Amino acid sequence: MAEAFAIPATTAVVTGAAGGIGRALAERLISEGAARVVVTDRDPDAVKAVAAELGERAHAMAFDVTDEDAVASAVETIEDTHGAIDLWCSNAGVARGRGLGDDTDWDMSWRVHVLAHIYVARALFPRMAERGRGHLLVTASAAGLLTQLDTAPYSVTKHGAVALAEWLAIRHADEGINVSCLCPQGVNTPMTAGDDGTSATRLGGAYIEPEDVAESVVAALHTGRFLILPHPEAADYELRRVTDRDRWISGMRRALAKIRGAAAQRS
Ligand SMILES: NC(=O)c1ccc[n+]([C@@H]2O[C@H](COP(=O)([O-])OP(=O)(O)OC[C@H]3O[C@@H](n4cnc5c(N)ncnc54)[C@H](O)[C@@H]3O)[C@@H](O)[C@H]2O)c1
């Protein structure tokens, strides 16, 4: 178990906070007493609107998490303006590529779901290490623990995000840096707004609200737990997957047949 993170009086940054899980996380951090929460996303108007809704402890900043110079400059500007960053929620994500996807889907998914976390670790971890404290929350997905049948680029790069979060949690603990990894299944957000009965995630279980995810994150920050599972059943699914891969693959093939059946009925 990593060290517990106390939210009151901290400075936090949330990427991908223009809506969905990121916005809910920012709102919840403020209601838990964070002194400053920097809400960031690509679109300056969208983050300004969210910051205005969340009140005076919210601050807007727009940058692209796949641009390493922009991430480094955001870290510097935020620390110069607001003081030490205690918590960085690396939450931006993209849903790209049906099936195998094309090279652009792979490139974008890799850059947002893996490289973006590396860029923040490069820019922020030396500062956190010098202070001997700091926390990184990586939003991966249950797709990174299990098998997301709809899209290979999403599932594979989210597996990368989980592996990277584990690696960072192990390698940087002795510098006082804690890392946790958020792995929800379906959540009602702009990303999943188009999901219908033919979506593997929709068939995989009930969708929860972004506020439920924020609740799980706050609870896990209080205990210092690494893996955050807002859908607790994901732990059981992961156990089944690693215990018997052949059985897992057979079960997933049956699930895929169900998805194809549902899609055929709709068309
Ligand atoms: N919704 C779900 O069912 C679900 C399930 C598991 C994991 N997740 C993950 O949760 C995170 C939040 O997703 P969400 O569901 O709230 O969807 P969302 O689409 O509402 O939020 C994702 C945000 O990331 C931003 N973003 C994308 N690329 C960016 C970039 N290069 N630079 C800066 N910002 C960028 C988008 O503009 C968007 O506002 C993502 O990492 C997603 O993969 C979502």
Image (cartoon, helix red, strand yellow):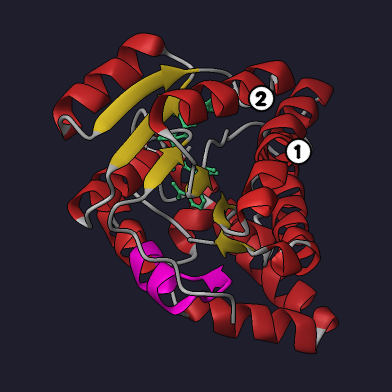
From where the camera sits, is residue 119 visible? yes
Q: Which residue is mark 1?
A: 122
Q: Quadrant of residue 200?
A: bottom right
Q: Left of 185 or right of it: where is 153?
A: right
Residue 194, relative to residue 228: is it above or below?
above
Q: Label 1, label 2: how many angstroms apart (C-alpha)?
A: 8 Å
- Whether residue 262 sits left or right of residue 9 in the image: it is right
Q: In the image, what residue occupies the spot 30% across and 64% down?
A: 215
Q: In the image, residue 123 lies at what x, y percent?
A: 70, 34
Span highlighted in magenta in the image: 217-230
> Under 8 Å from ligand 1: the CB of mark 2?
no
* Rendered position, 252 above or below 80: below
Residue type (three-letter) at the residue carrying disc 2: Ala
Q: Kindly check if marks 1 and 2 are in contact, taking CB atoms under 8 A apart as contact.
A: yes
Q: Is residue 219 magenta?
A: yes
Image: 186 above or below 117: below
Residue on which disc 2 sits: 72
Is residue 82 in the magenta section? no
Q: Amino acid at mark 1?
A: Arg
Residue found at the very far bottom of the displayed protein? 243
**Horizontal side of residue 89 vs 105, given as left or right:** left
* Picture mark count: 2
Query: In x, y percent, where is residue 194?
Result: 40, 35
Question: For this rendering, which residue is in front, 157 or 116?
Answer: 116
Give me the residue at 50% from left, 31% from top: 79
Q: Whole-percent x and y of residue 221?
A: 43, 68
Against 35, residue 134 (above or below) is below
Picture quadrant where residue 114 is located: top right
| The label number, if any, that marks residue 195 in the structure image | none
Q: Residue at x 22, y 54 (%)?
A: 33
